[in-house]
Image: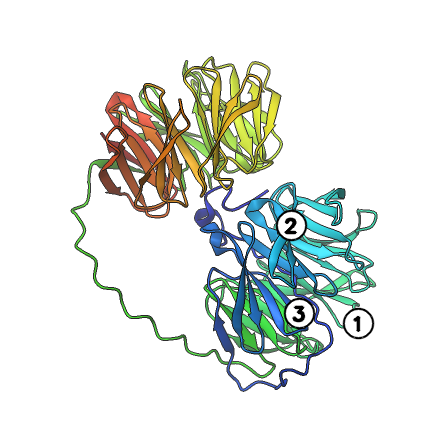
Amino acid sequence: MNRTSHILIAVAMSATLVVSCSTPSEPGPISASRPVGQGDGTVARMALPRAPEGIAVAEAGFAYVTQPDHGFSGGTLARVDLNTRAITTTIPVGMVPSLVIFNANRTRAYVSNQWSDNIGIIDVATNTQVDAIPTVGDPFALALSPDGRTLLVTTNANQLFKIDIATKNTLGSIGLPATSHHIIMEPRGKALYVATRDGGTVMEVDWRAMSVKRTFTFGGRTQNMAFSPDAQQLYVANEFNNVVHVIKLATGTFTNIPLAGGGEGLALGNKGDDIYVGLVFSGAVQVIDRLSGETRRVIPVGGIPREIALDYTGKDVLVSNEEGWVDFIEPNDSLVPPPPPPPPPPPPPPPPPPPDTGYARVTFPDAVFQAAVFGNAAWVTRVSAGMVSKLDLTTNSITASFAVGNVPCGIVINRLGTRAYVANQFSDNISIIDLATNAQIGTISLTGDPLPVALATDDTTLFVTTNANSLFKVNILTNSVTGSLPLPATSHHLLVHPNGNLLYVATRDAGTVLEVDWRSMTVLRTFTLGGRTQGMAISADQSELYVTNELSNVLHIITLSSGAVTNLPLASGGETMALGSDGKLYIGEVFAGLVQVVNPVTRTILRTITVGGTPREVANDPARNQVIVANEAGWVDLVRY
């Protein structure tokens, strides 16, 4: 499973935060409202902000384009007039909308709201989201049955789901070898084809029986697909193998057409004569003669071309570009218009204060995520290496490293300092570490990808959340799950109250913090804060709860006796923090490369430390009067009080 933002290491682990997930919409009868030419040699371009992704085209002369904005704000759907090439309406939808499709008569559209874990239902007449269908996991690719009553959707639970639209009931599911970002229905509705992306395959599915008929194995990373006009061949873009696979469906054999780079978006244009492929890493669109397989031209569009859809004319194609525009390519176009002139420069900022140099740095060979401190050592998770390293805090040197699972993130140490527990996100388990030998001695399996871990005050119960949107309670004496609690969204931070009875769960995209009686696994209170709730700390007298907000750029201060909330503005989005032994809060600001130090009593910011990179989790080291800031850029900073 992989929500790139769920692991919070999108830059280090993948080229995309929001995976592209659009299947071109098949147009209806060609409209006569706009003449169709062969192109004047210049690609027409319209600005479309907020990182456009999926495209659905209606023969009435408009398109819906998703605007996920990398998850930095609420998702929107832009309605674009294809004659004037202008945005006419912007529709609020869920978080990180990815793919959008129309039903047959274009009265409804369906959009996969990736981080909201639902499918938005759009009324086209009013351009509003009128309902939503909840999904298990983050939805990506969408397709409709020929009668428009059944929705097929894939999520990062590595499943294909069949959903009755009228009742919102799941009618069946199929496990996939990896997350799928593109699916396509055979024009006659006989089969559904599922590209498994990192699985490197395409599955031919009997969607009525929900069974796999054939699997075509290619390797690499299979992405978008299109059928030949006679539906006898299926074209598949491969993002890693730099080819288009041409499958002859009658026999199951295939040939390859070379690409000048990794292909992601794909559609047929020019009345089906040409294959258009977006080369996502090369900033280009390759145009291929469909019958001969020869490349007609490679168009340097720049940016990050994502999805490609056929215009209602049947000849042109639309190419969404994550850098903030849509290109309209006609059959003879080969040149890209010059970019618009840049806006005038802003006035120069005031000179910055001298840098805060009150920290030391320890370099690691790869990305790190979290440190857990016991005695004179810290154990640091290395997400891209699948390892944990021991850092000697008296010498600031790495003294041991050992393997755990895939993408280790959260780590917690018991009170005796004998065991550590590491959340292996892509292995769907928790490593049990013997700290005396620095070795993994067992694992605890979970449902979904785990990220944060916390221990009860008596060291007998482990808490962990996964992207199955659930909180799990694990008895570490038996290594068994003894309870669970559904969450409104994935949680990336947990905090155990010192009284031993309460657990606080920040629900991230739901913008809330849940106060949970973990013994009965019931929610006592919900603090609704908005934005994206992340790291937490509790005051020494246990009267206040502190919560960072990654999108609202504030520190929330909750008075626990009354539930009242006050906010302290931060320089940028806070992801995590630690309460130092000096009573100050040390807050890592992930997008700005900062650590800000806050006095929670006076509600003032005392220091702003520029550490650079991508600061992740912060841990307190009271013996040396410092906090440890893990940085995804490949180092740990030791910030002195």
Q: Disc 1 or disc 3, which is closer to the eye?
A: 3
Q: Which residue is mark 2?
A: 131
**Relative to 1, residue 150 above or below:** below
Disc 1 is placed on an element classified as loop
Mark 1 or 3, nearer chain start? 3
Between 98 and 5, the one lying in front of the other is: 98
What amino acid is found at the position of numbered circle 3 in the picture?
Answer: Ala
Q: Are marks 1 and 2 in contact (CB under 8 Å)?
A: no
What amino acid is found at the position of numbered circle 1 in the picture?
Answer: Asp
Mark 1 or 2, nearer chain start? 2
Does the rendering let one see residue 258? no
Q: Position of residue 46 (x, y in %)?
A: 49, 73
**Relative to 226, residue 410 above or below:** above
Q: Which residue is mark 1?
A: 230
Q: Disc 1 or disc 2, which is closer to the eye?
A: 2
**Relative to 228, residue 10 above or below:** above
Q: Residue at x 52, y 17 (%)?
A: 461
Q: Residue at x 64, y 82 (%)?
A: 33
Q: Residue at x 52, y 73 (%)?
A: 86
Residue 77, quarter of the rendered image: bottom right
Disc 3 is placed on an element classified as strand
- The coloring applied to the image is rainbow
Residue 58 — which label?
3
> Whole-Å distance between the Cαs marked 1 and 2?
36 Å
Between 53 and 286, the one lying in front of the other is: 53
What amino acid is found at the position of numbered circle 2 in the picture?
Answer: Asp
Residue 593, quarter of the rendered image: top left
